[in-house]
Amino acid sequence: MLHNRVLPAGLLAVTSLLAPALLPAQAASYEQLQTFSSLLNQVRQNYVDSVAYPDLVTAAIEGVLSSLDPHSRFERESDAEREEAYAMGRLAGAGLSFDQVDDQIVVLAVSPRGPGARAGIAAGDRVLTINDTSVAGLSSEEAQRQVIGDKGRKIRLLLSRGSRLEPDTIRVGLKLDLVPARSVGMVRLLDHTTGYVRLAEFQIKGGEEVAKSIKQLQSQGARQLVLDLRSNPGGVVGAAIEIASLFLPSQAVLFHTVGRRKSANEEVRTDKEGAFVKLPLMVLIDEGSASASEALVGALQDHDRALVLGRRSFGKALIQQRLPIPPRGDVVWLTIARVQTPSGRIIQRSYRGLKAGQYYSFAGKTGTEADTSTIYHTDHGREVRGGGGLAPDVPLPLSARLPPWFSVAADSGWIEAVADSVAPLLPKDDKARQAWGSATADWQARLVTPFLERATTRLKISSTPSPELLGRLGRILGYRVAEVRWGPDAAEEFWLRNDPDVLAAMQYWPKLDELLNSKSR
């Protein structure tokens, strides 16, 4: 969700219901309020069980908001304080972002190398239970709060994956860990001239973090940059504005906000020349790139400032304003505007007339025909379309999906058992470290084969993994070996050297100018 940076907060004025003369529309509204008040009184007086009045009002508020759009929501003061403690790093979490899909809690994004990622949880997994208690009836925010707590606290999740008609069930155990409130997750050189910045989410100091990271890379020799926004669920829109401004000239349009009220309509521009306006740039996105990520990518793509590679983004770009609800300190996050890219594209997928399941089923896919029928043009005349997220300039294939049994294997410690038996046998020197990064045959023979033997013997697995899955398992196990033998820095280096999307992007540097200036995509 895009948190409103510039639009003024305010409460709607409440007119007196005791006005001496009511217009027809006012009279009708007054009658509806009377109906609602009568209903509350009937429930309180006659329902079989005792019901607290505040609970009824809260349920009514939530019902009103859910009828508006999929993302407006009500938040109690205590819950807001708990979420703030998590955002400030005072509480630990699972590294998972949840959303609601047709009355089911679904994993929207997984923080790289967080507790959820280490357990093999993937975006799209459906949450059935948390600590053996069903999540049926919970909102995504309520479920999210159940995976927040003290560091080291154990959490049990039951998930389903794959077809809804014949789903695979996965049990996962993990320990909560502190999640630093940082935007930048990884900063490295991919080769002597190519820098890489992983932008995991948009926190308040995101612009400052990215600028510092690029300067660090340039001091090491970087002359071009890969900005990784894969699985970035968004965050503070002000950070997205600051980051986009680093790469664009003064007074470049970043996006427009379009709402019903005049105060919600705004054109956001850069206020000065970007520090890296001439730095060659590529951006990686996928179906987990959402909200502020999409606003940033839309601006860079429309101005032909970056080549966008990967898979279609999520399709969620609404401006939400935090409005207080007196007298207890509760708040409502209310959608007040949509985001338009500089060319005029609406990123947000349609939701009017759609049930929640239909709306979310389009995530990462092409939007409805009405969403995508209009053609827009970038600064250099390339054709782009809106609705249902942003399509990359260069589509890249999906990674092989991890099978359901992988979570059981990960939870059983088999990854550590296999990898940790190999790691001590490798030389400690830098030459061995470099060689391990491309030793694909060794990964398969010394890691994947014994790992699969355990799974086959203990879990009675009969299916043969695809070559793509074998490659992904090799990267996961090889990463663990690098981390144990040479440390976290070596593990990061290993992962990037073997990331299929990063490897694909590196092939496009010679064609970058041609692709960004060509009208054919």
Image (cartoon, rainbow, N blue to C red):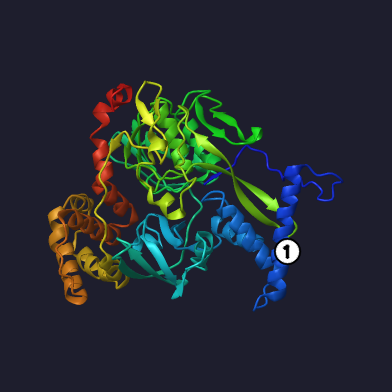
- Quadrant of the rendered structure where residue 429 is? bottom left
Q: Is residue 366 visible?
A: yes
In depth, the one of 496 and 244 nearer the eye is 244
Quadrant (top left/top right/bottom left/bottom right) for the C terminus: top left
Residue found 60% across the figure and 58% down from its top: 62
In depth, the one of 222 and 375 nearer the eye is 375
- Quadrant of the rendered structure where residue 389 is? top left
Q: Type of residue at label 1?
A: Ser
- Quadrant of the rendered structure where residue 127 is? bottom left
Q: Which residue is mark 1?
A: 38
- Residue 304 in percent (x, y) is at 38, 26
Residue found 39% across the figure and 25% down from its top: 378
SS assignment at label 1: helix
Q: Is residue 229 left or right of residue 449?
A: right
Residue furthest out toward the front: 24
- Residue 510 in percent (x, y) is at 24, 28
Residue 510, compared with residue 455, is above or below; it is above
- Residue 488 in percent (x, y) is at 34, 56
Residue furthest out toward the bottom: 48
Total marks in image: 1
Residue found 53% across the figure and 41% down from its top: 237
Q: Is residue 444 left or right of residue 185?
A: left
Q: Is residue 110 visible?
A: no
Q: Is residue 366 left or right of residue 320?
A: left
Residue 479, compared with residue 250, is above or below; it is below
Residue 59, compared with residue 508, is above or below; it is below
- Residue 377 in percent (x, y) is at 39, 24
Circle 1 packing at 10 Å, graded few (<14), some (14-19), many (20+), is: few
Residue 143, compared with residue 519, is above or below; it is below
